[in-house]
Amino acid sequence: MGFSIRTSKFRHVFCDAPKPDETWTGMRLSTVTGDQQYIKASSKYYVVALQGGGGPMCVGRLDRPGRFDQGTSPVVHGHKGSVLDFDFNPFDDTMFASASEDTTIKVWGIPDEWEPTDEKGLFKAGENLTESLTDLVGHKKKVTLLRYHPTASNILLSTSADCTVKTWDVEKGEAITSIDVPDLTQDIVWDFKGDTFASSCKDKNVRICDARSASISLTIEPAHEGRKSEKLAFLGDSTKFLTSGASKTSSREIKIWDLKNLSKPLCTETIDTASGALIPLYDQDTNVIYLCGKGDGQIRLYEFEDKAPYLHKLNDGYRSTQPTKGVCLVPKRGLDVMKHETARLLKLTNSSGVHPLSFYVPRKSDAFQDDIFPDCVAPSHAHSGDQWFSGSSKSPVTMPLNPALSGANTAKKKSFKTVSALSKELDEANKRIEYLEKKLTENNIAFD
């Protein structure tokens, strides 16, 4: 057999270190530790937890890098304890949920005039956001992780130190199902359609659960034999599933599993012997896995293929001397596709703020490259929360990334109002009714 080299569109993907004026600095980060990513982003904003009373959070605009000044720049706060995790609504870039040590979950709406930094990158004074849209109360101990549903509107998954995983209907403000787990949960992820979710636990087992019936359908015992935190990722609409953890000898590793047969992994890739947890960020449009280790500065790139050997290392990825505290992916619709930016990671550091890491595929043409930018997930839900809970199963709604076709798939967003806003509207309506009744009485017109 002749020697052959596997072809890949992403073999030469590269990432340059961001310039200082492209980063966000000045945040005094919260010192809480855990299994969370510490940073989350929509296509417009990012959020990180800060030091201070009331669980303050810095919400920054992706189009306004610059310096944040705690005490001057506006923050979001309203919890009674430190914030441990957050997640943006995939169908509304201005809405996110936060989980706290005070056992509550709060859902926030970012106002249109939100500007922590000005056009020159300097900190800007503003009014703090202190009133949430709704509060979700039901956990008995600190809430550690949050995940929004990928296809149904306003369905939220949460896990807590009380060893439960709850599914919430945000519109109704109540938990609709709850599953008990034997120990502290290290990660929770939805599958491609949101029919099931996976959770990794401190007992080293990974459980595949049906959120509607609150039942455990499959279990991997154990996924990894080491003691490091286990992270999970469903690999798109395939039946393959990725776990990251540690071996018996404490070497960090990732495994690919087939959900149809969990007796043994399809492949195992040993990474190194560093101590931090590995966070796998999977891009389902390009099948590229960005493997980020907490505490180290390297981001490794693998391409997933749904046939043996399943994983292909692309190149050396990105290397930096700045250790990673947390990391997240920016949604694909927030990228600069005309510059062939195929992914953007936001890297949170302990001392130098938030660094945007843009990965580019080198192309000579300036035209839109449809072979590396297929249709991506749109900010539109496929079904309502009630429809999903009743058994509906749909793939995510997609949209084209080509700017010439932008706006081809947009849906009207459901708006939420705070209690004070509704109270103000009610007072105004009552005053109007009183005025109209007075006019009718003056003109001797009967009314009920």
Image: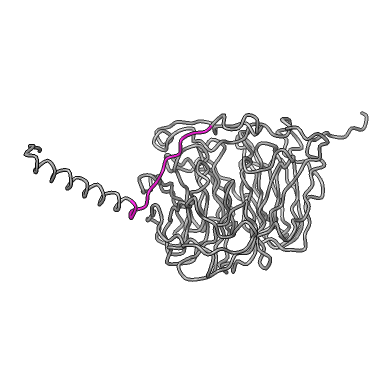
Q: Position of residue 20 (x, y in %)?
A: 73, 61
Q: Position of residue 59 (x, y in %)?
A: 54, 57
Q: Viewed as shown, does residue 77 lie left or right of 65? A: left
From the viewer's side, name the closer residue of 25 and 78: 25
Q: Is residue 418 magenta?
A: yes
**Colour mode?**
one colour
Query: At x 43% / y 55%, what residue is drawn?
Result: 106
State which quadrant residue 8 falls in.
top right
Magenta span: chief secondary structure: loop
The image shows residue 228, relative to residue 259, as above or below, that is: below
Residue extending furthest front?
A: 443
Q: Position of residue 332 (x, y in %)?
A: 64, 41
Query: At x 40% / y 58%, what residue is drawn?
Result: 131
Q: Position of residue 428 (x, y in %)?
A: 26, 50
The image shows residue 236, relative to residue 298, as above or below, that is: above
From the viewer's side, name the closer residue of 152 and 219: 152
Q: Is residue 298 magenta?
A: no
Question: In the image, which residues are magenta?
Answer: 410-421
Q: How many numbered badges does the structure rendering display? A: 0
Q: Quadrant of the N terminus?
A: top right
From the viewer's side, name the closer residue of 406 and 225: 406
The image shows residue 189, relative to residue 23, as above or below, that is: above
The image shows residue 418, relative to residue 130, as above or below, that is: above
Q: Quadrant of the C terminus?
A: top left
